[in-house]
Image (cartoon, helix red, strand yellow):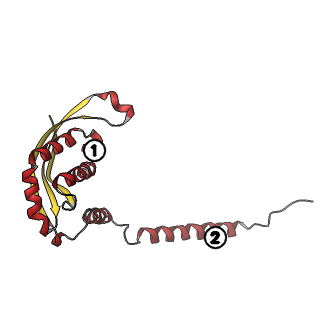
Amino acid sequence: MSYQSAVNPEQVCDRTQAVWSLAAVLIVAVVSLPGCGGRAEARLDDYLEELEFDASFDLVKEVQLGSYRVPIAARQSSAYQQGRGITWMQLKFNLFAVVAPEDESALRAAWERHQGMFNDTVLSTCRQMSLEDISDPRLAALKSRLTDLARPILGENRVRQILLNDIVCEPL
């Protein structure tokens, strides 16, 4: 008794073509979905920028807290690169506090009263940064630390956010 296959080679070929056609249609559908274009990255940046603020830009004031030029001896924070030594950098930026319009004069008065302590806090915070913190284009870690440290000095409920502007990081 011999065994003969009941599979027709033409049916196998038709099924293979159908699977490939279905795969091509699915790929085209996925690629053409909204959000898969080149503009998605820009939209993500816009969204993240909006998330940084508790209130609309129209409902807040920016108060300048000085211009800083800070030399930094930055180290690698990861354990396997600890032995690479120190990288000398200089970080330049303008610092602003975002406040409610009714808190603007109180914040300015607190800043003038505690300007020396605030400047020392900014300098020491910048000098404690690692290379990974400095290489972050948004400087999220620095902004977060400065916001947390500015609130007790300038007013816990006054400072909504700290902004850095005209940021330049250059080797020394």
Say which residue appears at 70% left-offset and 65% top-offset.
9
Which secondary structure, mark 1? helix
Residue on which disc 2 sits = 14
Left or right: 13 in relation to 21: right
Please state the total of marks drawn on the protein image. Answer: 2
Quadrant location, the N terminus: bottom right
Left or right: 94 in relation to 149: left
Residue on which disc 1 sits = 133
| Pick the front one: 156 or 6 | 156
Say which residue appears at 23% left-offset and 69% top-offset.
55
Which secondary structure, mark 2? helix
The answer to whether residue 52 of the structure is visible from this angle is yes
Residue 125, horizontal then vertical, whole percent: 21, 43
Residue 146, horizontal then vertical, whole percent: 22, 50
The answer to which image quadrant residue 45 occupies is bottom left
Callout 1, which amino acid?
Asp
Residue 31, horizontal then vertical, whole percent: 42, 68
The answer to which image quadrant residue 157 occupies is bottom left
Q: Label 1: how many residues lie within 10 Å, few (<14), some (14-19) or many (20+)?
A: some
Tell me if residue 25 comes above or below residue 152 in the rendering: below
Tell me if residue 66 comes above or below residue 52 in the rendering: above
Left or right: 123 in relation to 136: left
